[in-house]
Image (cartoon, rainbow, N blue to C red):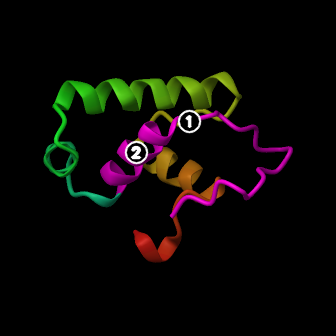
Amino acid sequence: MHNASAPLSPTRPDPKLSAREVQVMLRWITCDSKSAACSDLFITMGTVNTHLTRIREKYQAVGRPAPTKAALVARALQDGLIRLEEL
């Protein structure tokens, strides 16, 4: 999964996601639904939504908008947080 030592390309500014934000995003990406991610992580839907909102805000702030799940998958792949084989 996440390779913290892999530097991002200068053309891909780092949104500086927290470890928990990465965990929630990746669980949601690999689950069938937000409710499945909630169950797996033992958190509420509101907490998942809050994390996803903050993640999207951080990507937007560095000029890499990710308004959809597909866009977040693309960002996770670009940033080396997940590999295609894990999807």
Q: Is 13 colored magenta in this rendering?
A: yes
Residue 49: quadrant of the picture: top left
Q: Residue at x 50, y 72 (%)?
A: 84
Image quadrant occupied by the C terminus = bottom left
Camera-side residue of 30 and 6: 6
Disc number lying in front (2 or 1)? 1
Residue carrying label 2: 25
Q: Residue at x 36, y 43 (%)?
A: 24
Camera-side residue of 59 and 69: 59
Label 2 is placed on what type of residue? Met
Q: Earlier in the sequence, mark 2 or mark 1?
A: 1
Q: Farthest residue in the bottom direction? A: 85
Question: Which range is magenta?
Answer: 1-29
Residue carrying label 1: 17
Q: Is 66 colored magenta in this rendering?
A: no
* Main secondary structure along the magenta-highlighted residues: loop
* Label 2 close to label 1 by CB (< 8 Å): yes
